[in-house]
Image (cartoon, grey):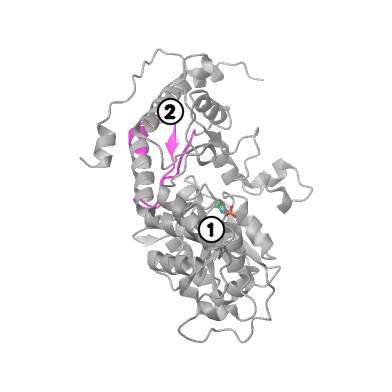
Amino acid sequence: MTVNEELIARPLLSDDPQAPLAIDGGAPVRDTPWPTYDKGAVFVEPEDEEAAIRAIRSHLFFRYDYRAYAETECGQFEQELCDYFGTRHALAVTSGTAALALAIMAAGIPAGSLIACPGFTFVATPSAIVMAGCRPVLIEVTEDLHLDLADLRRRWTPEIKAIMVVHMRGFASDVEALADFAAEMGVPLFEDAVPALGAELNGRKLGTFGLAGGFSTQSDKSLNSGEGGFLLTDDDALYARAVVLAGAYEGRVARHFPDGPHPLDTDLALPLLSLRMDEIRAALLRSELVRLPLRLACFHRNYDYVAQALADVEGISIRQPVAAGAYLGEAFIFRVPGGALNGNAQWFADALCAEGIDARNLGSARDANVRAFWNWRFLFPGAEVDEIKAGLPVTTGFLEDAVDVALSSTLEAADCDHLITAVRRIARALDDRAGAVSELPPQ
Ligand SMILES: *Cc1c(COP(=O)(O)O)cnc(C)c1O
């Protein structure tokens, strides 16, 4: 039996249709915390700890000391990333946001330029654009929360000098079509592949479709060093500039090109932003990279199990990938169509929380989720929320209808069964609730 078959063969929890929901005072589906990284549910093994300890004991914490590039943890990590992703270059840095900002700056996008990005992403994406001195232009997303190419075409202006696509919550955007469009417009495409580290679209790793891809190794991502990130590119000049900007001063950029001259005339034309990775984290990440395929298989197994078991549930619409298997599987997102109007999407998330499963209504009016663009107030000084929402009405509606549940790679079959049972029960109750709401007297 494969792991998948074993999981699917397990009987579901008893599912008494008469039992009241936890939100209505019934017994919850589970009484232990939902496993998430911030409660310590991480994919770390003793060999990873040992790797970090070895680096600590070496007392060589800085990547640019007397050693040759290939002898450092950072250098070896970068080489292993190149092998894993099939790219010419990788640069380890301090965060995903730093990787994205470095990509924009190193590509030579002039400060003040507009850069298109989706209206559904983590706040770090528009922040990286701002950090690079540019201005984000927000684009609508489709009902499956992927950047909408038709809307990008509609909003296009010649002032847009780059496109930043995001594989949000681990789902691939239609990056092949977006790369074609970027080529047609003559601008570079960057990928915020942070939430999709290791996921593929049609057999190709996300983060390798554009001029450069940015990744994070913050604790919630597929590789976890607390904080950290890296940049991938095949472009020699972009890479060399990113290396210098990140903090390879006084000719240290040459160490990244051990086989020949580096492509910069001088490294003094660029500021030094000190966004380097250290040796301890690189050692930890190198060890984790060995077991990344196993972790990816766990994500996929859990996601596929949950999504298959809930595919027939009425009243919810599960986020669909742009191609078969084109997701990491770190999050289960569905919409409760019309759920914003009658409050059902917020209620669904609340009901899941009451059952013991952490869930959020992405467009909640209650919690200021930084994945909803109207909460990026730094982009809209002085504007009211309703005004901001009016700029992307389609995305607003989809986010207000959406419910988001994190799926840790450490979930066990019983955890998945709890989620399945809870969603089924709550969706059933949705019918009654919808009836109750429509019987309310008009206001
Ligand atoms: C986590 C995340 C980032 C930021 O990564 P940091 O390492 O925390 O800077 C950027 N973009 C997306 C879509 C993310 O999910």
Task: Tell me the quarter of the image containing the C terminus.
Answer: top right
Task: Tell me the quarter of the image containing the N terminus.
Answer: top left
Instruction: Please tell me which residue is depicted at 52% across the width and 14% down the height of the picture.
Output: 25
- Is residue 107 visible in this depiction of the protein? no
Q: In this view, does 181 lie above or below 13?
A: below
The percent position of residue 37, horizontal first and vertical second, equals 51, 41
> Farthest residue in the right direction?
382
The percent position of residue 143, horizontal first and vertical second, equals 49, 44
Quick one: 202 or 248, which is closer to the camera? 248
Secondary structure at numbered mark 2: helix
325 inside magenta stretch:
yes
Q: What residue type is labelled 2?
A: Val
The residue wearing badge 2 is: 423
Dot 1 beta carbon under 8 Å from ligand 1: no
Residue at mark 2 to residue at mark 1: CA–CA distance: 46 Å
Secondary structure at numbered mark 1: helix
Nearer-N-terminus badge (2/1):
1
Question: Which range is magenta?
Answer: 307-336
Q: In this view, does 344 lie above or below 388?
A: above
Q: What residue type is labelled 1?
A: Ile
Instruction: Please tell me which residue is depicted at 49% across the width and 27% down the height of the picture.
Output: 352
Q: In screen coordinates, is 43 left or right of 273? A: left
| Total tally of numbered discs in the picture | 2
User: Are dots 2 and 1 in contact, CB under 8 Å?
Assistant: no
The percent position of residue 396, horizontal first and vertical second, equals 60, 42
The dominant secondary structure in magenta is loop
139 inside magenta stretch:
no
The percent position of residue 161, horizontal first and vertical second, equals 61, 69
Q: Dot 2: within a 10 Å radius of its alpha carbon, few (fewer than 14), some, or many (20 or more) residues? A: many
Instruction: Please tell me which residue is depicted at 59% across the width and 78% down the height of the picture.
Output: 252
The residue wearing badge 1 is: 56
